[in-house]
Amino acid sequence: MIRFFLVAFGLPWLLFPVMYLWGVGAWALVMMFTPALGVIAQGEVYRPELRLRDFAAFFYPLAWVAASVAVTALFVPPSGPEAGIRYLLARVLNMPAEEVPRDVVDVIITQNLLVPLLIPLAMLVNTFFAFGEEYGWRGYLTPKLAKRLGWVGASFVVGALWGLWHAPVLLLGHNFFEKFWWPSVPLFMLFCAASSPVLTWVYLRHGVWGAAAFHGGINAFAGTYFLLYPPEPTWLLNPAGVMGTAGWIPLTLYAIWDIRRMQNTGRINADATPPTQHSSR
Amino acid sequence: MYEYWLSRWDIIIIDTQFFVPYVLAPIALIFVVIYVVSRIYNIRKPLTRRSLPWLIIVFISILLVIYGPDLTAPERMGFAVGGGRLVVDVGWWGVPSGKVYNLSDCSLEWINASTTRIWKVGRGPYVIIGMITLMPQGVKGYGMVTSDAEWILVARCPDAIYILGGPGLSPRVVYD
């Protein structure tokens, strides 16, 4: 596993100075393929089956967004789309939120309302790039660790590692909007650890492409949270922050229950990886 | 008095700011994606020994397209305005060099950069040098404008129209 870790964790840090100097941009997409490159470097390439029906998992994260919004609503009343969009635009444009022109905010809100029209494209693009990650995290590392820790234990460990792997982009402001804000790393490790059993559950049911679709769905739909809540403070009211992590809890509990049930009924066991996913090599 | 000068190295560094995120990153992404997918799905390897020289040629061609013109840049270029004088010393992409005018001989017009769009025949993107057209004002002339300029100076001098913009350039800086 050492080569997997060296490549999956080492390449993003090699890219870090480049992303720091010239912006994250497309380098983040390159980074998303480093876990897959790690598997290749490890010499344990496998060929996941590509089935159209597994792409349905792209829509499952809507349940997480709904849960996150519901959890947040227990503490903070929703403020509507303007405040969140104004906050994000102010960050991007580097200007005070109150100075962002109203017309621009209205255009962005309209664009967001039109987003459902782009779902097929979003599904393909997000799934494809998430595949680079899921091939390594769910398709390779989770089954490996599950042999020692069981599927649930492996899910939490892989989740924490997966969150830590994001450190180069988190320190450049990804998800939490502050550069070199170190709490972003443990916060995102918590987020990933909380979501990881759900991704394992999707992987066990839908394979690597299904997990990739689910991961793509998280990336695609997470921003809708900002239509109701501006991310202030960013550690709390943020789909990647405490409220987003709390949103995973009901889904994670269900995933753990169902994974255990599958294990008890012999449909999976901790020593085996789903044969349909790893059958071709 | 306002001055803005660039060296050839500044231009190369500015082009690298464009090259690394907007050209190199997508190229790297395409290569990584092709490599990963071809390895996983056992597609005939696209990166063979035979294709490597071609890939190197493509990469060098891209470098030449981006950096080649920089090699023809003058060692120092820029403009100065204020103190009763306008100096335009670029000597690249058709913008003259060594031109010195009395400001009283030129009519100056200030355009807020947020109210105009720049069309160019020349180089860019962060520092535009060459034949510049400002729309919708419809002003056309040779000049040099940086992307962070807040104000653009249109100087109608006896033998040419100059369009100039740089970081911090404003009417206040020039006239104070």
Image: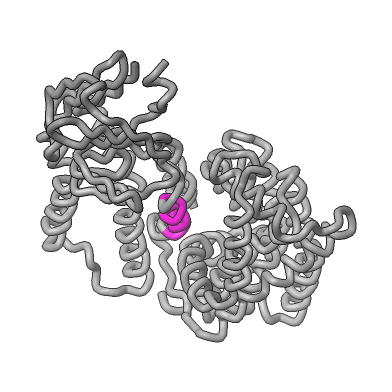
**Residue B3 in the figure: left or right of residue A169:** left
Seen in the picture, residue A238 relative to A18 is either above or below; the reply is below
Seen in the picture, residue B141 relative to A140 is either above or below; the reply is above
Say if the magenta span includes residue A30: yes
Residue B93 appears at what percent x and percent y? 14, 40
Viewer-proximal residue among A95 and A167: A95
Residue B137 appears at what percent x and percent y? 33, 49
Return the residue found at the far right.
Answer: A74
Residue A273 in view here: no
Residue B16 in view here: yes
Q: Which residues are magenta?
A: A27-36
Q: For the point 35% across and 57% down, which residue is it? A: B29
Q: Magenta stretch mostly in which secondary structure? A: helix
Q: For the point 41% across and 74% down, which residue is it? A: A281
Q: For the point 33% across and 67% down, which residue is it? A: B39
Viewer-proximal residue among A113 and A249: A113
Say if the magenta span includes residue A252: no
Residue B159 appears at what percent x and percent y? 12, 33
Q: For the point 75% across and 62% down, which residue is it? A: A248
Viewer-proximal residue among A229 and A192: A229
**Residue B68 in the figure: left or right of residue A205:** left
Seen in the picture, residue A166 relative to B3 is either above or below; the reply is below
Viewer-proximal residue among A92 and A182: A92
Q: Quadrant of residue A154?
A: bottom right
Residue B114 appears at what percent x and percent y? 44, 44
